Image (cartoon, rainbow, N blue to C red):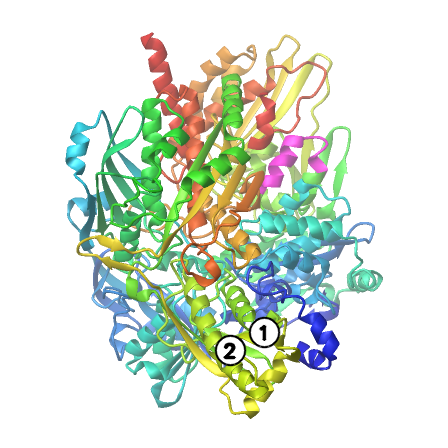
Amino acid sequence: MSNRQLDSLSHSQMLDKIRSEISSGVGKKIAHESAERHVNGEAIYIDDRLEFPNQLHLYPVLSEVAHGLIKHIALQQCSELAGVERVFVAADIPGDPDIGPVLPGDPLLAEDKVEYVGQVIAVVAASSMEIARAGASLVKVEIEALPAILDVKQAHAQQHYVMEPHRHSIGDAQAALSKAPHKLSGELLIGGQEHFYLETQICSTVPTEEGGMLVFASTQHPSEVQKLVAQVIGVPLNKVMVDMRRMGGGFGGKETQAAQPACLAALVSKLTGKPCKMRLSRELDMRMTGKRHPFVVQFEVGFTDQGLLAGLKLDLLADCGYSPDLSGSIVDRAMFHSDNAYYLGNADITGYRCKTHRASNTAYRGFGGPQGMVAIENIMDQIAGALQLDPLQVRKLNYYGIDERNLTHYGQIVTGNLLQEMTQQLEESCEYSARRRQIELFNRQQPIMKKGLALTPVKFGISFTATFLNQAGALVHIYTDGSIHLNHGGTEMGQGLNTKVAQIVAEEFQVDIDNIYVSATNTDKVPNTSPTAASSGADLNGKAAQNAARTIKTRLLEFAAKEYDIAVEKIIFINNHVKLGDRVISFTQLVQQAYFAQVSLSSTGFYRTPKIFYDRDAAFGTPFYYYSFGMACSEVVIDTLTGEYKVLRTDILHDVGDSLNPRIDIGQVEGGFIQGMGWMTTEELVWDDTGKLLTSNPMSYKIPAITDIPNDFRVKLLENRQNPEDTVFHSKAVGEPPFMLAISVWCALKDAVASIGDHKHPLQIDSPATPEAILWAVQEMRKLTEGEQSEH
Amino acid sequence: MIEFLLHNDKVQLQDINPNTTVLQFLREHRQLNGTKEGCASGDCGACTVVIVQLDEQNQLCYKSINACITLISALHGKQLISVEALQQQQLHSVQQAMVDCDGSQCGFCTPGFVMSLFALQKNSSDHQEHEVQQALAGNLCRCTGYRAINRAAEQALKSTVVDHFDPLARDTTQSLIAIRQRPPKDSQTGLNYQQQQSHLPEDLTALAQLLIDYPTARIIAGGTDLAVEITQRAQQFSNLICVQQVSQLQEQQVTDQHIEIGAAVSLHQCQQLLAPYFPDFSQMLERFASLQIRNQGTLGGNIANASPIGDTPPALIALDAKLILRRGANTRELPVQDFFLDYRKTALQPSEFIEKILIPLPEPHTDSDWALKIYKITKRLDDDISAICAANFLRLNNRGEVISIRLAYGGMAAIAKRASKTEQALIGKEWSYANIENALACLSQDFQPLSDFRASSDYRLLVAENLLRKLYLETQHMCPGSSHSAANSTIETRISNYV
């Protein structure tokens, strides 16, 4: 511990120390707090924990039918297998059998009916995973099949919804459309996305006294796991403790859907009295859990000769799968982001939450926002195509204004608008115009290879749109050796949240971050937490931790003022020391003196986001505290004989306000972009006509690999732009917004295909733009071009 | 019994299920939990560990492999290094580079990346950027977007620091030689566990005899496909015959007439061996699978596996390669194109196995010119199974007429096969765009491909046609007297091809 050494410093040495600030505070470029343990293999994930004796392993029995009635479940053969402890079905659940996070509809175990291929019907507990798996294969389920709805448009036609449709309206879209000089309409398909966190869903449980449960879960939402486990096993919440040190990736996939393995393990622990572990194999995880919502977008848009929007009707048909899960908020966020960066004027945007017989689709980085943005970016490209303009020109024309044209379709004024400024900066630094000309030349000379270029913006609203979720808590203890224990309600999934929150506390006390230990997220320490989601982790928990630290700091200041008979304003915490007028003592000395003077060295902290409100019935309000902005320009090349492509260069300029940690923020921007690029290019989910997922492993489902990243990848954070709102150290959220920078790749691919027809023909390519999708678009474009030539 | 070094400790195993993977051994038997399971199918690289073995000159050779689909018997006579062994007092230089460059976020894939980088750093001193990409293309990361990892690789490969493995190299070499030279007890090395056994024959005669004694036993070479049966489909094999120790199957030889490759030569070795002769073949092998798979998977295995989407069969058929098959003391020669009978059905007789592959070297003629062009079409550039693989061999005389053509496709039928009608339409004709266009109609007579999640039937057929057009575009300026086989089968290299 560095303090012991510091305590032995002479006074003059201390004076020397306090000339500089700590090197690990806010804004400093420090590494992820677990980086060393990541690289040496010592970082512990749930499957790496020391195992409890007599632990049971669980394996599920899945439905092979998309929709049907369960007639009979034959368990005997399985029960008789040596090593199998017991098989559990819905009737065994002592408490609430439904684990729907917001609305009911997610049975922990299917009871009378099944609603997707992969739904869990029974769970086998055995002494090893291999035996449990063998046992599961012996369970015979008889199901009477019913007609299944596997197509979102069919569900929409039959009004087969998990929730009621919802509309955002501004102005008179119908009137504006009828007056518009140009009109276009169409339909766009947007694919879903598998989270592919590298650590699959996992949980281990230990039964405790009085019927309680200790739960180690890989979850973004420990409080919800606590609540659902308590309900399933029928005990009050105070008997269940959830502990979460780190996840091997989450991306939204462990917001609600980590609950099922946790509740199953808790159920079996409850009924057997034994510790349990449920780890899903990759194949099980991909079959059982929901994904990003696929969307069908139907649009009708009017525009002027210049390309200015003049009336928009947008129907967003979301494939929610079989249950509501979080689809209410997800489709709302898609609707909130159907403007992306553009002033819509007169618009009707309607979200339909279609029920299909598939796994329940769920939160995924961007939470519907990406689908909404893709819908409007497609329209920007369509308008540009129809008017034969550079799409960037159409985009810039439609940007929200600073003082006018700044009202969104849900009643919020866009403030702190950086769109124009950032576009100009990126356009210059990436040499957009010069490269546009070079690409035109290249495309004229090359018959086979075609290049494309696109610059697209991102404006993303920050806050949970369910306003009550915008709260957080933290707990800080200082021990008598000066070391600090920090705990907060957020969860670490790789995004560097613990590092940032520790930096904030380090900054407040002016002690090195090595002096601060962030312990596992734990429902005993900070209760009633919100999920770590909506990019809000650092905004909310950082503020809560700051408040906790400030409470203790105030006590220390008051104590020191009295003890040293000095004005509070003359006491300065700096670089592990405290300056008391002319005197300097170490932080630890002050802490020890305060302890002996009976000063409390522990505090909770709490934070709620100010200003925001939203009336969903009126579809009006200020749901977002602020907006984050980003810009990306991507250049691609396609092979018109095969549809293969490569991203040649991407330039990104992204706004994170005053960065809490530029190294971590850059990592979020780069990682988000590549994940988004995967969604829009090679990540294709394919089901067969019985509703079975065919791309259920990494052999068939292709996330980006190292050779897929742009050959030239230039990422910059916007400099010297504080968040105008009073966020923690005026930073901005960074988790989700960069994901949508990848729309630039999709638009560049379309640009490359459009070049075949000299940008004279309308073009649409659904997402993901796989090589096959590109080749068909090339064929289509060639046909149009040939048709044109034969007309002349 | 099998014997190997775990880090620097000697391990002897006898009573262990031969279906046990190296990952299970590390995590469940040794509680070494640094190595992670991400997919258990060799597709994500989270379980990457390094195997150290002796090459022909008794030099230590470091190979990254996927622990999740490598069976424990593959460790015999080798050293196994997992992430726990890298750090001494300080982080290893590859680990430090990952920390310095922010190469980890959630950290779950990180030990795998660290081990791939460690193997890369150990293997050579002169690293090209391309080599880094190749070494890491089989490690998936969902968090970082890879740029940070690329920078970490750069830093790690710049440092020429001697690590703690270097001073032990001589001891390690001695230990491995000792294991190899120790006379196997009961004339057999292998494992025995309840009803399950595996054999590790050391030479061809022993292997041939074992296959006669146990005609239903499964041959396992790299096991990169067979082990997936164990991890993904809960198969347990009761009798495995491992061929990696058979020295004759590891032989490589180049004569005036052909290249001879032992059936158990790894795909990575094949890639290096073939590079000077058939750059396109070598480049296709680079994208065949991840380096971890290519280090473990073998040429013989890829052929015997008889997958309709295996990538080496089309290339070997295009080159008119032959197989030497052995049963007991008898051998026979069979062209690769006659080896595949139907979906996953081969001409192998019971107890028969592939001993070696003979690839003829095209004869240089002053009055004709040849080219080999291989195109592998996938959704993702690297580490992806082909939607279509087209391998084309072409020889033109000095009048520009086709005197020999072999167009072999994977992914177009239940087996890898030639487009014979299309070939017929082109043979003897002038190699011209018009003649190609005329011949294209034959392709749909040659093939009626399937639709699946990789590609639709229509796409496969259209791409097959277009690849023939591409073949023409890339060979139209061939000049007699020189071979025209410069590699250009990836999209990036093709960009410059038309400029």
- Distance in Å between CA atoms under marks 1 and 2: 9 Å
A198 up-or-down from A680: above or below: below
Left or right of residue B291: residue B390: left
By secondary structure, the bulk of the magenta-drawn segment is best described as: helix
Q: Is residue B282 magenta?
A: yes
Give the position of the C terminus of chain A as an image quadrant.
Answer: top left
Q: Secondary structure at mark 2?
A: helix
- From which residue to which does the magenta span run? B273-288
Quarter of image, res B22: bottom right
From the image, tell me which residue sits under label 2. A553
Residue A89 visible in the current orientation? yes
Q: Which sits in the foreground, A445 or A649? A: A649
From the image, tell me which residue sits under label 1. A573
**In the rendered structure, are the residues bearing label 1 and label 2 in contact, judged by CB atoms less than 8 Å apart?**
yes
Letter of the chain that mark 1 sits on in the rendering: A
Identify the amino acid type marked 2: Lys
Q: Which sits in the foreground, A220 or A502? A: A502
Question: How far from the left and from the top, in percent, is residue A466?
Answer: 28, 61
Letter of the chain that mark 2 sits on in the rendering: A
Q: Is residue A615 magenta?
A: no
Question: How far from the left and from the top, in percent, is residue A781?
Answer: 38, 23
Identify the amino acid type marked 1: Phe
Give the position of the N terminus of chain A as an image quadrant.
Answer: bottom right
Question: How far from the left and from the top, in percent, is residue B246?
Answer: 71, 52
